[in-house]
Image (tube, rainbow, N blue to C red):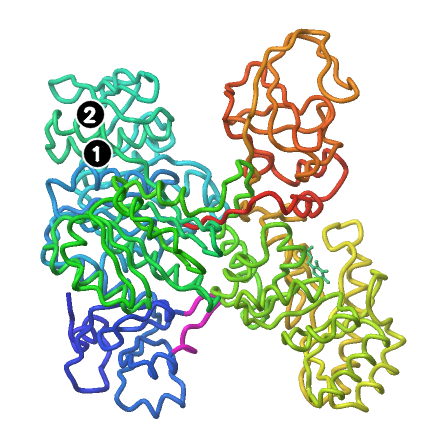
Amino acid sequence: MQYSIQEIGTILGVPVNKEGSDKISILLTDSRKLALPAETLFFALETKNNDAHIFIGELYEKGVRNFVVSKTFPEWADFGDANFLKVKNSLSALQKIAAYHRKRFNIPVIGITGSNGKTIVKEWLYQILEKDYNIVRSPRSYNSQIGVPLSVWQLDDDSQLGIFEAGISQPEEMGKLEPVIRPTIGVLTKIGEAHQENFVSLQQKIMEKLELFVNCDVFIFDEDNHLVAECVDQMVLSQKTFTWSRKSRDAHLYISAVKKKGEKTVINYSFLDFDDSFTIPFTDEASIENAISCLAVALYLHISPTGISSRMAILEPVAMRLDVRKGKENCIIINDTYNSDINSIKIALDFQQQRKVDRHLKKTLILSDILQAGIPPGSLYKKVAGMIEQSGVERVIGIGRDITTHQDLFSTPEKSFYLTTDQFISSGEWKNFDHELILLKGARRYHFEQIGALIEERIHETLLEVDLDAVVHNFNFYKSRLLSDIKLVCMVKANGYGAGAVEIAKTLQYHRCDYLAVAVAEEGIQLRKEGISLPLIVLNPEVNGFEELFNADLEPEVYNFRILEAFIKESERRGITDYPIHLKIDTGMHRLGFLPEQIPDMLSVLKKQKGLKVISVFSHLSASESWHFDDFTHRQMEIFRKAAEEIEQAFNYPVYKHILNSAGMERFSDTKWDMTRLGIGLYGISASGLPGLKNVCTLKTTILQIKHISSNETIGYGRKEKLERDARIATIRFGYADGLDRQFGNRKGKVLINGQYAPIVGNVCMDLCMVDVTGIKAEEGDTVILFGENLSVIELAESIGTIPYEILTSVSPRVKRIYIKE
Ligand SMILES: *Cc1c(COP(=O)(O)O)cnc(C)c1O
């Protein structure tokens, strides 16, 4: 749908400076996702971390002419043919336009909030209702202050039902989303502790969430949650409530029985004057609860009980994430099994673009028929082909009847089409993939996992799963604690604390981190080869590695006279001037660095040369995490401040100063520096116990064998462990060669199997170890978690007297890393 720019000016109540007939169809908040410049209205959002006004020049160059801004800059005077709509707050303006757009539609709109299950309930409602309505819904989990308006903006004249989710992490956010969604049907999913840190109590968080429902016709919730029921009582809600319960027959919808049978669950219910039942192909509690929420909505919308039971029976799991895996023949495979609709294709293509920093990889897309009701196939595939062309995909493989019928619409350099997945597999075309970045995007019924299995590198069942969304969350978490102009150096040394430096660096580069740091030149060179162009500091450079260091534009830490003089010589030999270096001062750690008393001599050496330029001066704290040593830490900072001033005064340009690491940022965020260095916190571990970080790494393996062993038998090498009772012992595929410290043996350590802890028994072997699964639900082939969300690296480290850093970096390179992203 389009709005004229004049109309938008009127909605926002601001003048439009240029006459003209520009039609706006795209609201853009992320300059990297520019698609059709002429129809784009860019919102220059300002957050604590970023100010998007800086991208306006670049967008103007690319043809964008309409901008919503909250300030103006003199250099825009040249952009005479552009419109600048000046508002107080660009985000509020975005929400206002979406709210205006929403008002034009007199259709049912389902608004979903809660702590868990929002996206699943939304997707399942879509699966249940798509036959009856032409539905617009939030793509993936676009439920933020920005995601919600962008979701609602998709409503158009064909829409018959909207399903939107809203997520909040702070007080007062829901009040802003309510007019944008303006739900007629409200659904509250499970309430838990997620995003609790900004609320004083669970009650406050619930009350806040309920704000979404103040104007609904009906509000659906689980009345067995007493806290929710109490909050509902306190709210002045104008609408009807529709409650469900597993305990009380007085609820509108009474769930009379829930029986698990093998892989399925049968749910019996009473509603009005009838009893019925249906089956879902899941057995976990969360799925049962989510299915009941969907049932309530379906009943409210008068879907017949037979319709409900036939659709519930084929509910599909919702793949929430994209994952990135290594393929054969130097390919990288992005696997996205999320429902194949047009929005999710756009998101996946953006993600592919983001990963394509390495120029040698060809962009390939394997795409199935798109299952999207409501748009005639001709215009649907035209749109998709346009999107693909814009995103620069070089090779398209289409699988399915519809896409094959419309193959002429695709204009990529290479293309081929198959009616079925089997046909593609037997064609053998997949055997010639080579150096490609392959996006696999198929609706579930096309079983693209079969293609994945052929082109992925052999999968070991031992994996380190790295959550890239959590990395971004943690990055922003620290960024938001800093004053806005402080630069962040992210540590990707030691292969990104074990998580894999390349993918972490790509993610940080995309999210506009300022600087990266590695320990040795080889690490930096590898990152350069993979397309990382951010400035990179090498912390422990060696005189031997100079050649490569200069060639790869790596910026050395200079910590003594030997290195300093060698660098000066090399820069002079190469005829370079102003090569960037970072000076390290030893303020008490006594590892690397110039001592304060060496500074005058160092400065006189530096002043006599032109080859090097000091970009920053820094020092490292020895005990920033420990309040025991706060006096010492303050003394280190004082020594550093003096040293840095002395150095800065010697030059006629500003020099960045930095001393804080992760724990330093957590505990001394009030001290002012120009840069900080984020390490372990990025990987989800707070040395000072600060809440709010997300777990990044999960180490997983599988059970190879389970057997019953009698009391008095011994387990493993050296007969260290003698069983005191009969036990069920599982052997798992992980040993000290994979990075499991031998100290975890003999019940010092534990693993997590199906949500329960199992102690490690006997000595840890090289490639295997044994765990006691007596009384625990465990089968051969089950997944075993060695660390992750509910088995924290911090706790593990403490149990054997080491630090989280060692546990993370000890995971052997032979353990495959996979990267996931929502
Ligand atoms: C590793 C390192 C850091 C990061 O430390 P964390 O405790 O992981 O935040 C910062 N500065 C230097 C010099 C380092 O070597």
Residue 53, horizontal then vertical, whole percent:
40, 77
User: How many discs mark residues in the rendered view?
Assistant: 2
Residue located beneath label 2 in the image: 252
Left/right placement of residue 315 relative to residue 804 reads left
Residue located beneath label 1 in the image: 241
Residue 729 seen in this snapshot = yes
Q: Are marks 2 and 1 in contact (CB under 8 Å)?
A: yes
Amino acid beneath label 1: Thr
Left/right placement of residue 84 relative to residue 634 reads left
Quadrant in the rendering for residue 314: top left
Residue 784, horizontal then vertical, whole percent:
55, 30
Name the residue located 76 percent from the left edge and 87 percent from the top edge.
Answer: 573
Range of residues picked out in magenta:
46-55
Left/right placement of residue 790 relative to residue 234 reads right
First along the sequence among labels 2 and 1: 1
Position of the N terminus, as image quadrant, is: bottom left
Query: Which one is nearer the viewer's eye here, 801 or 201?
Result: 801
SS at badge 2: loop
Instruction: Answer above or below: position of 304 versus 480.
Output: above
Instruction: Answer above or below: position of 187 versus 28.
Output: above
Q: Residues within 10 Å of mark 2 (few under 14, many from 20)?
A: some
Quadrant in the rendering for residue 16: bottom left
Instruction: Answer above or below: position of 656 versus 750.
Output: below
* Distance from Cα at disc 2 to Cα at disc 1: 9 Å
Check mark 1 vs ligand 1: CB closer than 8 Å? yes or no.
no
Q: Which secondary structure dominates the residues rendered in magenta?
A: loop
Query: Which one is nearer the viewer's eye here, 331 or 15?
Result: 331
